[in-house]
Amino acid sequence: MTRYLASDLHLDHENIIEYCDRPCDDVEEMNRELIDNWNDVIGTDDVVFFLGDLGFMMDEAGVQNALDKLNGRIVFIEGNHDDTDRYVSGLNTHQYYILSRGETEVMLTHRPQNCPSFWDDWVIHGHHHNNHPDEYPFVNPRDKLVNISVELTNYKPVEVRYVLECLEAPE
């Protein structure tokens, strides 16, 4: 079992292709490639901390269909395009999640601005895609932020271990 992070698939969201300059011709190609990329990395016993925005305007059947295609056990942090009240019953959802590895703790959330006020350490988030690269690059040591939107992770989930190693790397 390996732990991974992913965010902002935006399945069925046609406008995201242009908005984030995704390398796809249409939404069907984007959906297929994102799901294939996910399953190429994630095994059935792996855990994925998914930081929100699975789809766009999906109903419960669409969400269930997407989840059925994705390998692994998903810990779901709700994004601004997710309506988990409509989602599949039993889906493990959170507004934020504190992830621990040894003595290191990081906050997982969709939007870094939504972190609880008590938190003053590293935040791993999505939401900002590749639209504000100066403020929200993959790793922003000044503000202790890591942006794992799929546009910054080669459209694939990334290992928790790799991300935490990036936090320990010298600047």
Image (tube, rainbow, N blue to C red):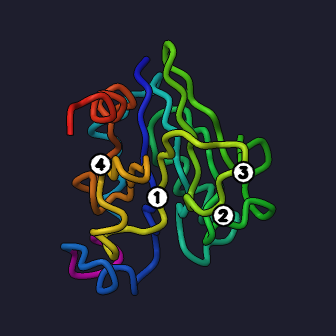
Which disc number belongs to residue 156? 4
Tell which tag, 4 or 3, sits nearer the viewer: 3
Chain-order first, disc 4 or disc 1: 1
Q: Distance between the residues labelled 2 and 1?
A: 24 Å
Chain-order first, disc 4 or disc 3: 3
Tell me which amino acid carries mark 3.
Ser
Tell which tag, 2 or 1, sits nearer the viewer: 1
Tell me, yes or no, whether the two marked residues, 3 and 1, touch with CB atoms within 8 Å.
Answer: no
Chain-order first, disc 3 or disc 2: 2
Q: How far apart are marks 4 and 3 (CA)?
A: 30 Å
Residue 138: x and y in percent read 30, 53
The answer to whether 146 is drawn above or below residue 55 in the figure is: above
Helix, strand or loop at mark 1:
loop
Tell me which amino acid carries mark 2.
Ala
Relative horizontal placement of residue 86, taking residue 41 as reference (left or right): right
Residue that mark 3 sits on? 117
Quick check: is 111 in the magenta stretch? Answer: no
Residue that mark 2 sits on? 61
Tell which tag, 4 or 2, sits nearer the viewer: 4
